[in-house]
Image (cartoon, rainbow, N blue to C red):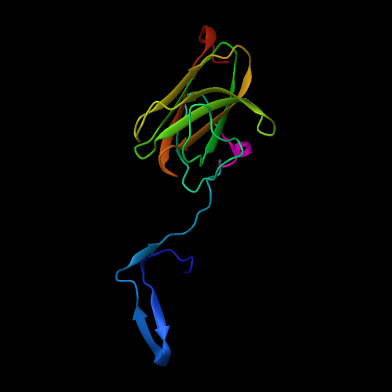
């Protein structure tokens, strides 16, 4: 099958005498393979800033070496985000998508070494239910966020990072 996107593909078999048989009874679609998302690997995590709400996907994502977080199971075709957390500030991470049954976990550490799980959320039992983690670190940390769709292999979602600064000082 050629890798040429189309919505009018058919399968035909050539027999002897230049006779063709149409073995597909209707048109079907061939889509271009776009490969995994840019943030498919831990060290390729997309940076988040306070107030961000980004559209994300784990379509074509693969399983990372991180494995399953403490609250989850499922497909593990995960993607990653990151941010730097300051001691005393409160951070709220939320993931939600109409076709996305999210698992959400946060870790401290660095992508090229061991990450330590801080929290995990899997409260919803179906797509469209937000998963939320709220935490206040006691020390400055590099935070990595892992998310994947529990019930199916892929979906689209929004990820948000809200911050409440200690002493209302955003600097």
Q: Position of residue 80 (x, y in %)?
A: 55, 35
Q: Nearer the viewer, residue 109 or 75?
A: 75
Instruction: Determine if the magenta segment contains residue 41.
Output: yes
Question: What's the residue at 58%, 26% (across, down)?
Answer: 107
In this view, the residue farthest toward the left is 25
Instruction: Determine if the magenta segment contains residue 52.
Output: no
The quarter of the picture where residue 18 lies is: bottom left
Question: What's the residue at 40%, 80% (across, down)?
Answer: 13
Q: Nearer the viewer, residue 79 or 160?
A: 79
Apparent side of residue 32 relative to residue 81 in the rendered image (left or right): left
Question: What's the residue at 38%, 77% (across, down)?
Answer: 12
The quarter of the picture where residue 101 lies is: top left
Vertical order, 83 against 39 (above or below): above
Kindly tell me whether residue 72 is visible in this rendering: yes
Q: Nearer the viewer, residue 32 or 99?
A: 99
Question: What's the residue at 49%, 57% (across, down)?
Answer: 33
- Boundaries of the magenta span: 40-46
Q: Which quadrant is the C terminus positioned in?
A: top right
Q: Nearer the viewer, residue 75 or 158?
A: 75
Apparent side of residue 91 relative to residue 87 in the rendered image (left or right): left
Q: Position of residue 159 (x, y in %)?
A: 45, 31
In this view, the residue farthest toward the bottom is 17
Vertical order, 8 against 131 (above or below): below
Numbered label tally: 0
Apparent side of residue 56 relative to residue 86 in the rendered image (left or right): left
Vertical order, 117 against 35 (above or below): above
Kindly tell me whether residue 53 is visible in this rendering: no
């Amino acid at each position: 099958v050629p890798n040429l996107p189309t919505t009018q593909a058919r399968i035909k078999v050539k027999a002897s005498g230049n006779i063709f048989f149409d073995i597909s009874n209707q048109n079907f679609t061939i889509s271009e393979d776009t490969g995994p998302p840019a943030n498919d690997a831990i060290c390729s995590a997309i940076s988040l800033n306070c107030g961000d709400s980004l559209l994300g996907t784990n379509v074509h994502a693969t399983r990372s070496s991180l494995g399953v977080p403490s609250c989850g199971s499922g497909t593990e075709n995960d993607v990653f985000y990151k941010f730097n957390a300051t001691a005393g500030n409160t951070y709220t991470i939320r993931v939600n998508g109409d076709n996305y049954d999210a698992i959400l976990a946060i870790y401290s550490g660095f992508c090229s070494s061991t990450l330590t799980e801080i929290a995990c959320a899997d409260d919803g039992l179906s797509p469209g239910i937000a998963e939320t983690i709220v935490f206040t670190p006691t020390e400055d940390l590099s935070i990595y966020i892992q998310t994947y769709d529990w019930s199916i292999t892929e979906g689209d979602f929004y990820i948000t990072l809200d911050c409440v600064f200690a002493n209302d000082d955003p600097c």
